[in-house]
Image (cartoon, rainbow, N blue to C red):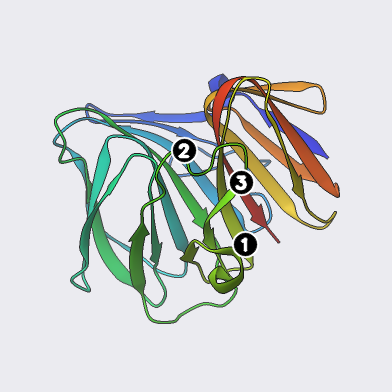
Amino acid sequence: MMDHRQFDSLGRFETDWLKARHHFSFGGYHDPSRMGWGSLRVWNDDTIRAGTGFPPHPHADMEIITFVRDGAISHRDSLGHAGRTIAGDVQVMSAGSGIRHSEYNMEGDTTRIFQIWILPDRPGGEPRWDTMAFPRGQDSGRFVTLASGHPERDGGLLIRADARVLGATLKAGEAVTYPTTPDRHLYLVPSTGRVTIDGRTVEARDGLALKGVESVTITASADAEIVMTDTR
């Protein structure tokens, strides 16, 4: 199964400080056919104006992964965690039994992020937050695990789900193959560039859902940065 979600077809929400596109139903955007993909529940493409951001608000029972595409995001939460995650890097907040947090663009220019929500394997648990540097270039020509339910095996940040979040950069003409199993749900978004998969062209910020395959080969038709989730 392959479901191509073109960028112009995504749900949208805009204010004076935020321009958001929703790959799945979120907030005021509701599409019964787009309620998630496996345990992937949310993939938001957010553009945040300088000096603005999301004020304190609560979450529970969700693994929230933020991939910073451009700029930086500054995090603060009710457990006392505070940190700044820059372009190419990732932060994870396991909301667990409940946490309040804010996310602000404290930079002098626009910040762009992918905000990815994955349902945890079990509800509850101690809330936690962490961030990790993934210098751009270290993932050239291969997938690097950004977050995983098994970081001791895969690397990356811990999430409480049978899932992986992966990133890769490909030069034009370069290809990467990802082995999987037919029961897994893959969702891929090029942050930049253009790729082809099984003859289908996927442009920057499009989404592609895949299931029922034993491997997927992604070929860059232009220099590309890719983020992909692998969930049950």
Q: Which residue is mark 1?
A: 163
- Front-most of 222 and 51? 222
Vertical arrangement, residue 43 with respect to residue 91, above or below = above
- Disc 3 crowd, CA 10 A, few/some/many (<14, 14-19, 20+): many
Find residue 102 and report its horizontal and vertical position in percent: 23, 55
Which secondary structure, mark 3? loop
Check contact, mark 3 vs mark 1: CB within 8 A.
Answer: no
Q: Is residue 206 left or right of residue 184?
A: left
Query: Of the residues shown, which amino acid type is indicated by label 1?
Result: Ala
Q: Does residue 177 appear to the left or right of 124 in the view shown?
A: right
Q: Please rate how many residues cluster around mark 1, counting C-alpha atoms within 10 Å: few if below 14, some from 14 to 19, many from 20.
A: many
Disc 3 from disc 1: Cα separation: 14 Å
Question: SS class of the residue under badge 2?
Answer: loop
Q: Nearer the viewer, mark 1 or mark 2?
A: 2
- Name the residue located 52 percent from the left edge and 48 percent from the top edge: 42
Dot in front, 3 or 1: 3
Outermost residue toward the bottom in this view? 125
Q: Position of residue 71 (x, y in %)?
A: 27, 35
Q: Is residue 156 left or right of residue 149?
A: left
Height in image: 204 above or below 135? above
- Mark 3 — residue? 143
In primary-sequence order, the first of circles 3 and 2 is 2
Identify the amino acid type marked 3: Phe
Marks 3 & 2, CB-CB < 8 Å contact? no
Earlier sequence position, callout 3 versus callout 1: 3
Q: Dot 2 corresponds to which residue? A: 137
- Residue at image position (48%, 49%) is 116
